[in-house]
Image: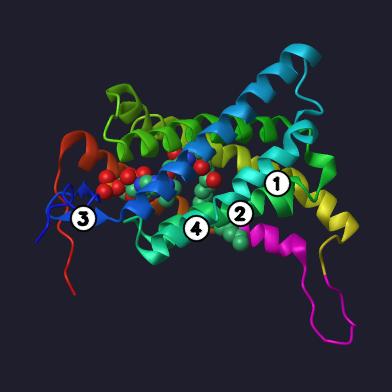
Amino acid sequence: MASGEDDGSVEEKDNHKKRTISPFALAWLTFYNIAMTAGWMVLAVAMIRFYFEKGTHKGLYKSISKTLKFFQTFAVLEILHCAVGIVHTSVIVTGVQVSSRIFMVWFVTNSIKQIQNEESVLLFLVVWTVTEITRYSFYTFNLLNHLPYFIKWARYNLFIILYPVGVAGELMTIYAALPIVQKSGMLSVRLPNKYNVSFDYYYFLIIVMISYIPLFPQLFLHMLRQRRKVLHGEVFVEKDD
Ligand SMILES: CCCCCCCCCCCCC[C@@H](O)CC(=O)SCCNC(=O)CCNC(=O)[C@H](O)C(C)(C)COP(=O)(O)OP(=O)(O)OC[C@H]1O[C@@H](n2cnc3c(N)ncnc32)[C@H](O)[C@@H]1OP(=O)(O)O
C-alpha cells in the first residue's frame, strides 16, 4: 500500500490509528480555514477600528453584521465536513456548536434590533472572534504540518475561559431579548390561522436557554478531552463497531 506521502495525500495522526485525507480534501480544507481565519481577522480589525473611532460599542453590531453573518453562516460547512468524513470529529458536537451560533446571529441578534447595543452582544462577539482566529489558524497550520506551539497552546487553553464567558454573553443577550419578544409577539404564530398551528417564540427562547444546561457541559467536556489528547498525549479508546 502506498504511503500517504507517495500518493500526495497527507496522513493525520491519531492516538491509535493513522488517517489519510485526499489532496483535494486537503486543498479545500486549507482554503476554507485560511478564508475563515481571514474573515474573523477582518471582523477583529473592524471592531477595534470602530471602537477607536467612535469610543463606544453602540452601533458596532450594525457596522459588522454583514461580515459576521457571512462568516458565521459559512461555518455550516463544518457540519458537512464531518458528515462526509474529511474532518474526523463528531457531527453532533459540531452541529450543536454551529447551529447555536447561527441561531444567535440570525434569530436573536439580527432579528431583534433593540438588543444589538447590549454589552452582552459585545462580549460574545469579542469572545467568538478571539476563539475563531485561534481555531482556524490552528487547523490551517496543522494541515500544513507547521503548527507553532503557541497556537496549539492557545487553541487548547483559551477555551477554558472563553467558552463560559461566551456562553454567558449569549445567555444574557437572549435574556435581554425576552421582554421585547413577549411584548411584540415577533416570530410567533398565533391561532387561529389556516394551518391551525401556533408557535410562541418567547417560550422557544426560554427552551433554548434551558437547553444550554445539558448541552454546554458536554461541549466543554469534549474540549477538555481534546486538550488532554493533544497537549498531554492521553489516549482515549474508541469502540470499534
Ligand atoms: C436551533 C437552536 C439551537 C440552540 C441550541 C442551544 C444549545 C447550545 C449549547 C451550546 C452553546 C455553545 C455556545 C458557543 O457558541 C459559545 C462559544 O463558542 S464561546 C467561544 C469559545 N468557544 C470555543 O472555544 C469553542 C470550542 N469548541 C469547539 O471548538 C467545538 O467543540 C468544535 C467546533 C466542534 C471543535 O471541536 P473538534 O472536535 O473539531 O475538536 P478539534 O478542534 O480538536 O478537532 C478535532 C479534529 O478535527 C480536525 N478538524 C476539525 N475541524 C477542522 C477543520 N476545519 N479543518 C481541518 N481539520 C479540522 C482537527 O484537526 C482534529 O484532527 P485530529 O484529531 O486528527 O488532529
Q: Secondary structure at mark 3?
A: strand
Badge 3: residue crowd in 10 Å (few <14, some 14–19, many ≥20):
some
Its colouring scheme is rainbow
Q: Earlier in the sequence, mark 3 or mark 1?
A: 3
In this view of the protein, which residue sits in the foreground, 168 or 231?
Answer: 231
Where does the magenta region start and end? 189-210
In this view, the mark in front (4 or 3):
3
Mark 3 vs mark 1, foreground winner is 3
Distance from label 2 to label 3 (Cα)? 38 Å
Q: Residue at x 76, y 63 (%)?
A: 201
Q: Which residue is labeled 4 in the image?
A: 96
Tally the numbered discs. 4
Left or right: residue 217 compared with residue 49: left
In the image, what residue type sits under mark 2?
A: Met
Residue under numbered circle 3: 19
Image location of residue 102, percent across then percent down: 62, 52
